[in-house]
Image (spheres, helix red, strand yellow):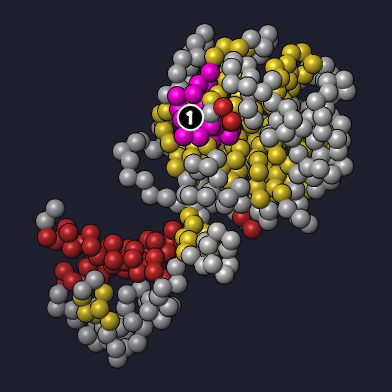
Amino acid sequence: MGRPGRRWLLCCITGFAFAFLWLTGELSSEDVSVGCVDSTVERRRRCCGVEVAGLGSRTGWSQNPHPGRTADVLLCLFGFKSLYMMHRRFPVFFLSPDPTTSPNNLQVLRKFAFQVSWTTEEILYRLDVGWPNRPEYFTGTTFCVAIDSLSGLVYVAQRGDNIPKVLVFTEDGYFLRSWNYTVDTPHGIFAASTLHEQSVWITDVGSGSYGHTIKKYNSFGDLVQVLGTPGKKGTGLTPLQFDNPAELYVADTGDIYIVDGDGGLNNRLIKLSQDFMILWLHGERGTGPAKFNIPHSVTVDSAGRVWIADRGNKRIQVFDKDTGEWLGAWNNCFTEEGPSSVRFTPDGKYVIVAQLNLSRVLLVAAPPVGSIGNCSVINTIQLADQVLPHLLDVSGKTGAIYVAEIGAKQVQKYVPVEGYFPSFTHS
């Protein structure tokens, strides 16, 4: 890189530095009232090593005898503007010590959601920064999200006091309604709709009168069905009891797959028929095949395989949906942390996996029918620290990934980069 290139790069970096210092409170608004240029006519400031006048001065831009230096200043302002716009649109966390305001000596100064990665990995998904149109409706801790692709609706369940527990958006980001009836402490959510019925299932891990249950609602929040013993955790099968049920998946046939045991008494996978009879069950804590330690998420692929995010054992286990036979496991991708959520892209080519404490979403190659093999990561979406992606869902129509983040307290939408997924990208 030649001398001019180095100078221009330094100017951009300096502009970023000015913006960072301002965002974290190290500079006052007076210091950066017009980027690097002072707003007064009489005084001059130095920016990127170049002395410039105020915009109203006769010795300003129009009469600058050094056009190269003018370009330097413009680059400096561009760097400042770039980081400022990131602050306006993205949730990354800028933290600084403050022992008076936080038990962890960390104070959230600005909420961002962007992280620069210097990897050469090709980008397959991009953040939809305009979704939703009104993010202020996220008033609690967003634990889960479900997509009704048939109706084009997005359901978000959040926790908190005196707030609506379920929010309903369109896939385009418009807020429609909210409801709260009989929802205590939501953990997982699933939208299962047909041409004749729109239904939403919620796993509830609360200790109140509706806790430790799995509940079916219509799209307006009317309670339709309750599975489990409301308010009472347990291990029983007759009647069926749950203890911190984590998530469920409802197949097109009406069969229900439930992972029961987000840190509770149970560590089991249950398959129910559409009339709620137990078809098969794996239910023991352990590290061997078909044993679990915090089974946290469940999904079914088009080949008839049931995929379980066995979070505590740092692996994904796979079963035959008809017989319950154990087919294999993936653990080579999860040496740092276990998976918290698992879903498939609509074309069935990729498995989407969230890792909570690493604030990471993985795009993994799906194995062919008849083989499980080893986990092979194709692409990574690295979120900012402490965003904490808990559960996610994928639109069956567009392939967009919706991620419920309990750290950032929001849901973010990632859309496929056009050209990589021609089977479900859209204009």
- Residue 410 in percent (x, y) is at 60, 50
Whether residue 220 appears in this view of the structure is no
**So how many labels did they put on this image?**
1
- Residue 345 in percent (x, y) is at 53, 28
User: Which of 291/23 is in front?
Assistant: 291
| Relative to 166, 290 lies left or right | left
- Quadrant of the rendered image containing residue 400: top right
User: What are the residue bounds of the magenta stretch?
Assistant: 329-354
Q: Is residue 203 above or below residue 250?
A: below
| Relative to 339, 148 lies left or right | right
- Residue 133 in percent (x, y) is at 60, 54
- Quadrant of the rendered image containing residue 186: top right
Q: Is residue 340 magenta?
A: yes
* Residue bearing mark 1: 334
Q: Is residue 69 magenta?
A: no
Residue found 57% across the figure and 11% down from its top: 327
Q: Is residue 339 above or below residue 144?
A: above
Amino acid beneath label 1: Phe
- Residue 74 in percent (x, y) is at 27, 68
Residue found 59% across the figure and 21% down from its top: 287
Residue found 39% across the figure and 69% down from its top: 21
Residue found 45% across the figure and 40% down from its top: 381
| Relative to 68, 365 lies left or right | right
Element under label 1?
loop
- Quadrant of the rendered image containing residue 395: top right
